[in-house]
Amino acid sequence: MIVNVLLQASRWIASIVAILAALIFIGLGIQNAGRPEDVYGYPMAAERLVHGESIYADPRPQDDRLTYRHAPWLAWLWVGLNRLPAPVLLWQLASLAAAVFVIVSLARLRGHAGLLLAALALPLLGAVPHANVGILMTALLVWRRADPWSVGIAASLKIYPLLLCVGYIAERRWRDLATAVGLAGLLWLPALWSGIGDWVPPPGLQSHPLFPVAAAVTVGISLLLALRRSRWTWLAVGAALPVSIPHYVGIEYIWAAARRLTRH
């Protein structure tokens, strides 16, 4: 009886902590919502596209947060969105739905691991006001369980999802590997005549001395496990993503391990 009471109390405590953490993350996001962020950079890139200008040119020098860093198809999508009323608000609402979907999907995994992964994904709620495309991208990967089509599309928005292809190597899924890489390359191809030469890497990619070391070590371990066909490759990839991505983002990608290991 006492054990059951303690277990019930722990669930309530965990739920309260999760709700408070979610409110804090949302509050922090709203507090910084007025700053120029990605959600304002997308429509600006679409406008440059319509006027025949380079979509990768820095729209505001000295402020790289508005720089467009994705395949051109997203800018084309925003050409249509700009014709709708309140396109930024619509994008933020879609991002909110995507963040909730990711968190709920992780929480529904078996055992305490799902709750832990869901807690790690709570920062997505704080990013909703900025509505970085990474939120929708993460939802796509969770929904499709990192299949080659979702990985290829995700890699056209952020390059680092290609690291998920290491899992395909471990499982000797060469066709899926070719599909993901080929689709990403195809979607990036129009960037060659869309002004990609004007793109300037953000300072964070170069300034932190530990980034190349962390990336090399985590990716190296993942590749080693993949070559040995280890079932723990997906776990290594899930850990490598948040470790090797600059700017300390991507902790929610640990979901990759849980989603893949519980697939069968």
Image: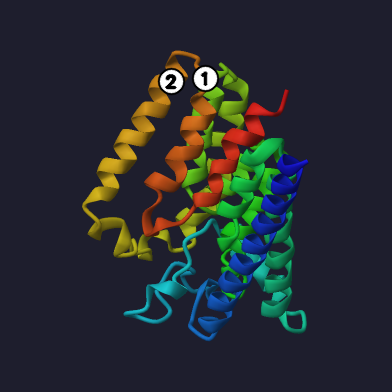
Asked which quadrant contains residue 91, the reply is bottom right
Query: How far apart are labels 1 and 2 at the CA level?
Result: 7 Å
Kind of residue indicated by mark 1: Ala
User: At x 78% / y 41%, what residue is drawn?
Assistant: 1
Asked which quadrant contains residue 22, the reply is bottom right
Q: How is the image coloured?
A: rainbow
Q: Is residue 59 above or below residue 203?
A: below
The mark lying in front, picked from 1 and 2, is 2
Residue 51 shows up from this direction: no
- Furthest-top residue in this view: 228
Q: Which residue is mark 1?
A: 170
Circles 1, 2 touching at the beta carbon (< 8 Å):
yes
Q: Is residue 109 above or below residue 43?
A: above
Q: Which residue is mark 2?
A: 225
How packed mark 1 is, by other alpha carbons closer than 10 Å (few <14, some 14-19, many 20 or more), is many
Task: Give the SS element for disc 1.
Answer: helix
Q: Residue 161 location, x and y as percent?
A: 52, 43
- Furthest-bottom residue in this view: 34
Q: Is residue 189 left or right of residue 104?
A: left
